[in-house]
Image (cartoon, helix red, strand yellow):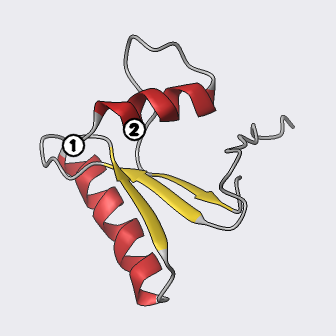
Amino acid sequence: PQQPAIYYFPGAEQRVVVYYTSLRVVRPTFEACKSVLSILRGFRVQIDERDVSMDSGFTAELNRIMGRPELGPGPSLPRVFIAGR
């Protein structure tokens, strides 16, 4: 079986970083993002929240991390990086 790809986010070794969207346009994506943030907050995890719908720089940053081209659809959300992975 093929192992899932492991993405590395340099500089985030001591953090939990969540890329999400606050736009309700695609309801399942919005609900998934809301759920992940709620779970992490419930555990009182300190989160570095990055709303891609509010800052296109976060979208470009996530595309770089995921090894995707700058243009075209971005990776599915939410994306959670714990200790840089």
Few, some or many C-alpha atoms within 10 Å of disc 2 (few <14, some 14-19, many ≥20)?
A: some
Q: As drawn, which residue projects farthest toward the front?
A: 11
Q: As drawn, which residue projects farthest toward the left?
A: 25
Residue depicted at x 70% and y 54%: 84
Q: Is residue 32 above or below residue 28?
A: below
| Rendered image: mark on residue 54 | 1
| Rendered image: mark on residue 62 | none
For the residues bearing labels 1 and 2, Cβ distance under 8 angstroms: yes
Which image quarter: residue 42?
Answer: bottom left
Few, some or many C-alpha atoms within 10 Å of disc 1 (few <14, some 14-19, many ≥20)?
A: few
Which image quarter: residue 31?
Answer: bottom left
Of residue 38 and residue 19, the one placed in the foreground of this image is 19
List x then y, in percent, for residue 26: 19, 41
| Rendered image: mark on residue 58 | 2
* Quarter of the image that includes the N terminus: top right
Amino acid under disc 1: Met
List x then y, in percent, for residue 14: 69, 67
